[in-house]
Amino acid sequence: MSVETVAVEAAGPKTGRAAVKAVRKSFSSPVASLLVIVLTVIWTVPIFGLLVTSVRPAGDVADSGWWNFFAHPSFTLSNYNTVLFQSSFGSSAGLMPYLVNSLAITIPATIFPLVIASMAAYCLAWVRFKGSDVVFFVIFALQVVPLQLALLPLLQLYNGQVHIGSATILPALNLKGTYVPVWLSHTMFALPLAIFLLHNFIAQLPKDVMEAAQVDGANHFRVFRTIVLPLAAPALASVAIFQFLWVWNDLLVTLTFAGGSADVGSTTVRLAQLSGSFGHNWEAVTAGAFISMIIPLIVFFSLQRYFVRGLLAGSVKG
């Protein structure tokens, strides 16, 4: 049920519609527009400072703040060249291998939970079975489990055997130095929220369409593939954006399960190495940070037309 419907039902038809109009008018007023512009400028200033710092020489960055660039302009692209291609700052490789690793980690870690969550959400919404509501609420409750709480048990699971007494339940997986532990961990922790969001959207799909497809002989897999997936594209895109950004910007899970080498380390791991123990090399860190922003921006703007529609998934009944 939408906010507008709640307002109308709570205050009566005429009073409720008047309240809705008043709210819309207040949000479209010049004051509200000015407030949005001010907040946007405040939000953009640090990013602009990041860009300016990334193109200043190291000596200028160390001696003065980025705003002094306008009084004494000095411009260089050597920071980007150093970060991307030169083996420095405690690593035998530039940023390029880490960017490739980030893509190798993020794309599967986004696709796996999206596929599993969409199928699970469809089953919980349209395939009724005994205990389906209990299963859904248990999955929803799993969101309260802190990620940090599971790091050590998962690390022991990936690197060693699982025993109950003297019996070996699971042999050693020997996953060290691979992307697999990171994929599995991100998939597990993404599933509860992804299933919840997709379930709310898929459950609101027209019942008549589902029943008509089943009358025509379509099984659940065909209904899911030909009807649910196309109609649920906004919700899928929103979940994909959130998951992609989460995994791309993650440092803790990647550093714990993959390590910081150029073979499997992500961009965030390399940026942490660039900053050093005492926060030096600002010019390198800002250049690397700006490079790491490019791919998430491409993903966001490619799917942004679905974003708002997906955020409202399940918020309006009918």
Image (cartoon, rainbow, N blue to C red):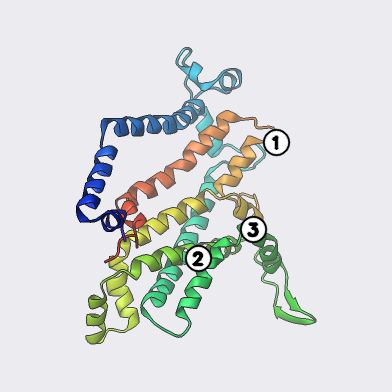
* Badge number at residue 277: 1
Circle 3 sits in a helix, a strand or a loop, which is it? helix
Q: CA distance from mark 3 to mark 1?
A: 22 Å
Q: Amino acid at mark 3?
A: Phe
Q: CA distance from mark 2 to mark 1?
A: 36 Å
Q: Residue at x 26, y 55 (%)?
A: 8
Frontmost of labels 3 and 2 is: 2
Mark 3 or mark 1: name the one nearer the start of the chain.
Answer: 3
Locate residue 264, reporting x and y percent: 60, 54
Q: Which mark is residue 257?
A: 3
Residue 318 sits in which quadrant? bottom left
Judging depth in this view, the residue of 12 and 116 nearest the camera is: 12
Q: Are there few (<14), some (14-19), or many (20+) residues within 10 Å of tag 2?
A: many
Where residue 260 appears, x then y in whole percent?
64, 49
Task: Give the image location of residue 128, x and y in percent.
Answer: 39, 82
**SS for dot 2:** helix
Could you tell me if residue 100 is visible in this image? no
Query: In terms of sequence position, does the residue under pointer 2 or pointer 1 come before the other?
Result: 2
Find the residue positioned furthest to the top.
Answer: 71
Per the image, the residue denoted by label 2 is: 192
Residue 51, can we see it? yes
Mark carried by residue 140: none
Give 188 or 26, whichever is nearer the viewer: 26
Find the residue positioned furthest to the right: 166
Circle 2: residue type: Pro
Looking at the rendered structure, the kind of residue marked 1 is Ser
Residue 16 in the figure: left or right of residue 156: left
Q: Do the CB atoms of the residues marked 2 and 1 lie less than 8 Å apart?
A: no
